[in-house]
Image: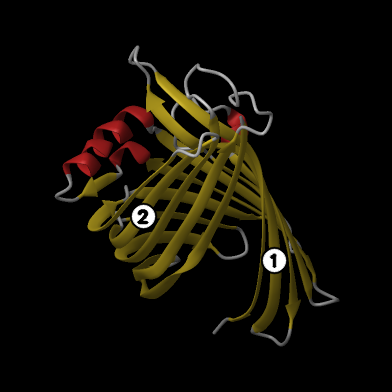
Amino acid sequence: VRQEGTVYEGGGVNHWSFGGALEVARNLSLGFSLNFVSGTYSYDREFVETDAANVYASTYAFPYNFDRFTYVSTIESELSGFNMLVGLLMRQPGRYRVGVSVRTPTTMEINESFTDEGSSRFDDGRAYDRSFTNRTTYKVVTPYVVSGGLSLQVTEWLSLSGDAEYTDWTQVKFETDNPDLLGENRYIKKTFRETVNLRGGVEFTLWDLGVVLRGGYSITRSPYQNDPSSYDQRAITGGLGIRLETNAMFNVAGSLGTWNSFRDNYYFIDGNGLTQRSSTSESLQALRVSVGISYRF
């Protein structure tokens, strides 16, 4: 059969943060922020199989005179959540900065409506249609995230920075009254793993021109066990800062990320108890651009 599919995803997430910092000792600061999350998500997928070469037009083998199968799945979600970030920064002006932070688990409440519709058509005119619609509310709790970073002022015009971020993804869990969804918690324990994400950067300051050049590289590990390294997200970043006045700077930055993944079209358990699936391999790229103005008091 010939397989075709289209997927449309949309929505957005808003982050609202309120925080502050206190210098608890000379060159030692303690900071925190309260972070609120809200947003929406939409998903629309159509998967189609057709007997384009008429392989089943005159056969008595299963699935008998098959012509076309269509599967449509849609999801509409509203979400809200909260977490807190606590950090400690030690610095030696003009030389280095060392920081550590802990982000508490995010409890995300999700209100979701979804539909599944399937239809099959055969050359002899037979047709079968089934659909399912439902609504559900559940919570997703993400794990703690522990980070540490270092910034070195190598010369007056050159600085280097790097950080590592640790997450134990086996601690993700669903909180719900739905027993099927609770069963996913066991799947998470068996399938996910711990990850350490790495980021590094360099910054050149051209004092005479009032310009700052930035570049960097990051690796975001796949949270799934046994995933090859090609499933890790790798990004090259670059940026430019233009000094507007003594304390103000205009900044523009961009990143290009690449990684591989796959998407299951469908799967089922056959008569021998084996999982049969149809999957699509994907090569992905993500381009992000940000623009802003910073002001230091």
Front in this rendered view, residue 133 or 246: 133
Q: Residue furthest front?
A: 124
Read off the residue under disc 1: 253
**Mark 1 residue type:** Ala
What's the CA distance linking mark 2 and mark 1? 40 Å
Q: Is residue 129 above or below residue 297?
A: above
Residue occupying the point 32% across, 50% down:
142
Residue 258 in picture, x, y percent from top left: 67, 44
- Does 142 sit above or below residue 214? above
Vertical placement of 250 versus 237: above or below? below
Residue 214: quadrant of the picture:
bottom right
Which residue is painted at 58% across and 24% down in the image? 56
The residue nearer to you, when weighing 280 against 99, is: 280
Which is more toward the observer, 176 or 202?
Answer: 176
Disc assigned to residue 115: 2
Q: Is residue 10 left or right of residue 173?
A: right
The percent position of residue 274, horizontal first and vertical second, equals 38, 16
Which is in the foreground here, disc 2 or disc 1?
2
Query: Which quadrant is home to the C terminus?
Result: bottom right
Percent x, y of residue 96: 57, 57
Residue 191 percent coordinates (x, y): 37, 30
The kind of residue tagged 2 is Thr
Query: Closer to the N terminus: mark 2 or mark 1?
Result: 2
